[in-house]
Amino acid sequence: MESPGATIIPASAKPRRHTCVCGNEECRLLTVCFQSCDDFRGGFMALPTTTGKLLAQLKEHKLKRTLVHLNQYSSNKDNWPCSIDRRDRSTPPEQTGAATTITSSSSSSNNNNDDADMESKFIANHHFHPEILQTMMDQGKSNIDCMPVDLIKELGLIEKGHYTAADLFYGKVPKGMTSPVYVPVPSYKNARDDYKMVATRWRMTKLLKELRQRRRGNSTLAPRGEDNILQPVEKRARVKENPLPGMRTDNLEDVQRAACFFAEEADFYKAELKRMKDEVKLRKAVWRGEEERLERFAKEEMGGLSRMTISSDLFHRQFKNVARNMFGFEDRSKGSTLSSWEMTKNFIKAMWDIDHVEPTMATIFDKGGRRKRLSTFEQCLMALMWFQNLPDYHFLASVFGCPEQVVSKVIKCWAPQFYEVGCNLARLPLTKDFLLKSYPQSYLDLNFSNYVATVVDGTDVLCQTVRKHRSVNVIQRSDKVKHSAFRGITWSLPMGLVHEFTDPFFARASEKAIVRVWTRHGRFRDIPIGWLISGDKGFDQTSGFYPHYNQILHPAFLTGGDKAQFTEKQMDWNRKACEKRYTSEVVFARFKKYGGLGQIMNRKSFHYVHCLWAWAHGMANMYLPLQTPANCDYFPESKYSKKV
């Protein structure tokens, strides 16, 4: 591949003679050589001064990175070779003739007083990448202080290693630019090889120019002065005319004519290419000028969900309820300044270590106007929307501007990770110390024979009926809800925190059978010996399923025949056993707010039901306790708070 510096970069003016701060003899010779070809790389850039106040931090960073690349950096700033400005800045620039450009400065001042008061240091242009120099020439600049990040990415200089993250500046930047920006650095090392091609091109161009002037533009195929040109170019069987003689490589006349002919064609195509490039630059300039305004209009004023707005800070700052409805996170504590969108970003960062990137035209579309692939953050956001609300794929595809097949692949890729997060949030190890510290005062007031370790309960989630397979149809049927359903068991602490749950089963399985399956394989060994388990009557006679044979605390059964009634003592016991067990129902109410589990589940989602089940249990734990622990200072609103 040809080097980007192999072509001549024409200089707009004759360069002054200066000395580069690198002090290298080869650098001096290269500068002289480029000057002989009237190339812009034979010029110099003035190093910034560190004594000024205008964009001082930017110029200091530019000088520092320049010295680092030249291997002349010193920790002592007094040793830095920089320009020294002794000019009087008390007079306005209009009266002194000083340059007023912010992003660039010119080194061709004609003010003798300024030259006397300005002690400048210079660096040769050939130290910088040719594409940066060409961009400067196109913009009519002879010096620059900073460049947009998009320009460096567009030129591909980051991938090639010419610019790194250390060259970025995050402070105050010139008006009209957005931080961070790149400072120009002398990182180019191929100037010597480029000059070989430049010198060859310059000499060949000069030779062709002289040759065309001498031949006066005569590059026709026929010999000069020949009248009869109506002759075929080669002998044919049925053509009696003599053909035109062929051109010979050893004939100087023919070679010169061929060179002139192709030089004329090259001039035509160069002019056409220049016209097209100017048109593209004009369109880019118009596009860049309007891009920021269009983005801000789409995010702050137009509204509506799209790939540009769904992950935009500006959009969610303007439309605050969208994030709460789409992603479900909300901080209801008094005095909280965290918005739902900020909580969503923090949750994604905490769980998957993915940083948010503000969407722009450049992050969504490539140079050809085609849509780029979804970023990792956008994929996670799409999966989060699906796991929270279970919208159909068509809706997600319309929001993110992608085919439904892409949505399907994203959900398939992220489902195991959401399952893992749900398990990490809702399958928790227990310790006796934690159970005692989190034990509610309201349970202490009930005076049970021992502490209640956990509350067990089951729930059914409605689903579509499979009619194609008879066996599946039968095992789907739930006698509890009189419909096809999934069934699962959940164990939660008296304070309302879920610490264990089963995977979903078809509802034909009884609650006792599911408990028997799930209490095997080493589970529930962390429930202390002798502690109670609270449940309804359906969990009677399940004590033997637990490793420590914990007693099940449930309401009394009515015995004694048809006319039997509960005694007053039994009714008191039933009320006492059921009074605080409402927490399990609240857990299920929270559980069914997520993943579409509160509605009839579509058959298309069956293969993700275990992931949705785990995720919903994890989200059910993202609330305050239902029963406040006794003597707890963490929740100041508690009526059982420690009194001093």
Image (spheres, rainbow, N blue to C red):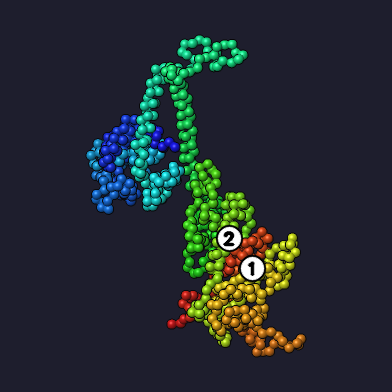
Residue drawn 49% across and 42% down? 287
The quarter of the displayed image where residue 606 is located: bottom right
Place of residue 547 in the rendered image (x, y in percent of width and height, measured from the top left): 58, 79
Seen at 52% across and 52% down, the residue is 375
Which residue sits furthest left? 116
Secondary structure beneath disc 1?
Answer: loop
Relative to 572, say whether 627 is above or below. Answer: above
Q: Residue 542 location, x and y as percent?
A: 64, 80
Left or right: 357, with 583 as reference point:
left
Q: Pick the quarter of the image with the N terminus.
A: top left
| Residue type at tag 1 | Pro
- Identity, as a three-letter code, of the amino acid under mark 2: Ala
Label 2 crowd bin: few (<14), some (14–19), many (20+), radius 10 Å: many
Above or below for 541 versus 255: below
Q: Which residue is mark 2?
A: 415
Name the mark on residue 504: 1
User: At 52% across and 13% down in the image, what residue appears?
Assistant: 229
| 178 horizontally vs 596: left or right | left
Q: Is residue 639 among the parts visible in the rendering?
A: no
Q: Are marks 1 and 2 in contact (CB under 8 Å)?
A: no
